[in-house]
């Protein structure tokens, strides 16, 4: 059975945020961002890979003349823990000097990625540089950063779905899932025997 089906049918993970909750919050974020960037012709910069689904939905709930671009950074590799080292894997194409830039992230965990982007993109002298993240784990923050728009604050567990991966799969899950604590405990007991 595929990992996708195991998550959906075998209750390996539980739903943390369902499709309806995600959609209605993104509608609100779209309205906030529309008000903030009216007549500013912003560039929205999606942070690959995780933000691609969130960004696709978010821009459809904004009523703005805007451009989009993408930047790809890495800090996690295939592990569940941050390595603490951020680097650019694919830079954005647009020139941002003097432009209003809104960076679109899937999740802020330690804050190291956002801090890195703040420094790197800030050095290119945009007219403004702001951040929106669908998810934020306040208990995991190492680097205190200001996130201008947050979709949901969540506990510090590892989540998958709606763009977020586990070893590059499960991005296509339509909701956001977290590994069930009970499932984790059951597994540990089994292995201990
Ligand atoms: P930070 O630099 O804030 O520690 O982490 C940001 C990046 O780590 C996110 O863009 C995402 O790629 C990854 N990340 C952090 N927490 C999670 C999580 O719970 N699930 C998944 N799939 N990725 C995460």
Image (cartoon, grey):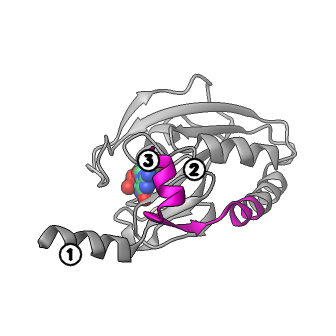
Residue 165 in magenta stretch: no
Residue 10 in magenta stretch: yes
Where residue 112 appears, as percent x and y from the top left, is: 37, 53
- Let me know if residue 128 appears in the view: no
Where residue 160 appears, as percent x and y from the top left, is: 48, 55
The C terminus - image quarter: bottom left
- Let me know if residue 107 appears in the view: yes
60 to 29, vertically: above or below: above
The residue identified by callout 2 is 173
CA neighbours of label 2 inside 10 A, class few (<14), some (14 to 19), many (20+): some
Distance from mark 3 CB to nearest ligand 1 atom below 8 Å: no
Foreground: disc 1 or disc 2 = 1
Decide which of 105, 184 is in the foreground and name it: 184
Image-based side of 128 in relation to 109, left or right: right
CA neighbours of label 1 inside 10 A, class few (<14), some (14 to 19), many (20+): few
The residue identified by callout 3 is 3
- Asked which quadrant contains residue 66, the reply is top right
Where residue 25 appears, as percent x and y from the top left, is: 73, 64
């Amino acid at each position: 059975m595929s990992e996708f089906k195991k998550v959906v049918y075998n209750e390996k993970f539980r739903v943390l945020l369902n499709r309806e909750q995600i959609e209605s919050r993104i509608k609100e974020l779209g309205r906030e961002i529309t008000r903030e960037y009216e007549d500013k012709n912003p560039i929205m910069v999606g942070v690959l890979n995780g933000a691609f689904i969130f960004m696709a939905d978010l821009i459809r709930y904004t009523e703005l003349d805007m451009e989009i671009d993408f930047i790809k950074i890495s800090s996690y590799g295939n592990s569940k823990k941050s390595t603490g080292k951020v680097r650019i894997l694919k830079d954005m194409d647009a020139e941002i000097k003097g432009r209003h830039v809104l960076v679109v992230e899937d999740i802020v965990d330690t804050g190291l990625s956002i801090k890195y982007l703040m420094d790197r993109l800030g050095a290119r002298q945009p007219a403004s540089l702001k951040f929106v993240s669908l998810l934020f784990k306040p208990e995991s923050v190492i680097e205190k950063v200001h996130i201008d728009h947050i979709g949901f604050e969540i506990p510090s567990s590892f989540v998958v779905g709606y763009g977020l991966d586990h070893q590059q799969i499960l991005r296509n899950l339509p909701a956001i899932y977290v590994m069930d604590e009970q499932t984790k405990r059951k597994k540990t007991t089994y292995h201990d025997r």
